[in-house]
Image (cartoon, coloured by chain):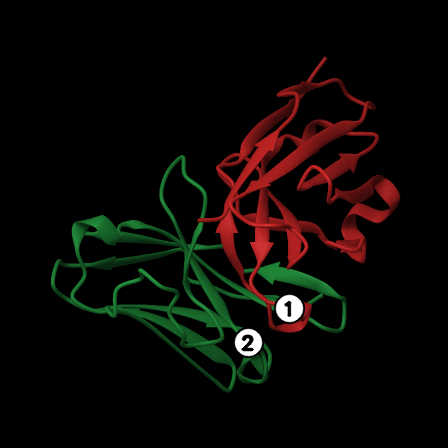
Amino acid sequence: SYVLIQPPSVSVAPGQTARITCGGDNIGSKSVHWYQQKPGLAPILVVYDDSARPSGIPERFSGSNSGDAATLTISRVEAGDEADYYCQVWDSNSDLYVFGAGTKVTVL
Amino acid sequence: QVQLQESGPGLVKPSETLSLTCTVSGDSISNYFCSWIRQSPGKGLEWIAYISYNGYSNHNPSLKSRVTVSVDTSKNQFSLRLTSVTAADSAVYYCARNLVLTPALSSFDVWGQGTMVTVSS
């Protein structure tokens, strides 16, 4: 089935920009969605359809998708952004939703 | 606003059946799909199945024929049954709303708080 590759961890200083990649074969042809999950809590959708933001999600969260990689960008990182982030797509060949393994964002 | 709440036993014996219910409040379920997703301790997210308000469903092939999902529109509830459970099925189980009605395009925009299910004798 389709595999999504994420870096296990990303570290960033407050106020800087964090970029989290999600690699997959021709992922640019799919709709990519991103979730934030803090310890003990359910995931929250932060970006859908590659670059759209749900209501209530700060503009600091943005997404892009092209070729073999999608990227979630968090601008002006805050301490509260520290969390695990997962990408997700629909694998039409296997008829199932696929999640990446997650990236832990640490705010230094 | 829409809220989802999972309920069911927190402990299931090996080889028995795990049964969970997702109760939706704040909206009628006759408007969307609902998915079940699980997360083993310290691990990532795994999609289990989705079902629509009218009973159309699909499940993760990796779970083969062990999964059954159903819907009760009169109670505004979705349900999950997973048979022949093993320790590997121990996880936090979430129900989540599919944002759009086309699976290939859908994300999950509203999640329940999750319920931990442990498989142990």
Going 80% across and 27% down the picture, which residue do you hit? Answer: B17
Whether the residues at callouts 1 and 2 have beta carbons within 8 Å, the answer is yes
* Chain ID for green: A
The residue most toward the right is B65
Going 44% across and 49% down the picture, which residue do you hit? Answer: B1
Query: Residue A83's x, y, as percent?
Result: 33, 49
Query: Residue A81's x, y, as percent?
Result: 25, 53
Q: Secondary structure at mark 2?
A: loop
* Residue A108 appears in view: no
* Along the line of sight, the residue nearer the viewer: A10 or B17: B17
Query: What colour denotes chain B?
Result: red
- What amino acid is at disc 1? Trp
Going 51% across and 72% down the picture, which residue do you hit? Answer: A32
Q: Is residue A26 placed above or below B45 in the rendered structure?
A: below
Q: Is residue A25 placed above or below A37 in the rendered structure?
A: below
Q: Is residue A52 placed above or below A34 in the rendered structure?
A: below
User: Real-space Cα distance between discs 1 and 2?
Assistant: 8 Å
* Along the line of sight, the residue nearer the viewer: A29 or B33: B33
Q: Quadrant of the C terminus of chain B?
A: top right
Output the chain of dot 1.
Answer: A
Instruction: Please give the residue where the numbered disc 1 appears in the rendered image.
Output: A90
Disc assigned to residue A31: 2
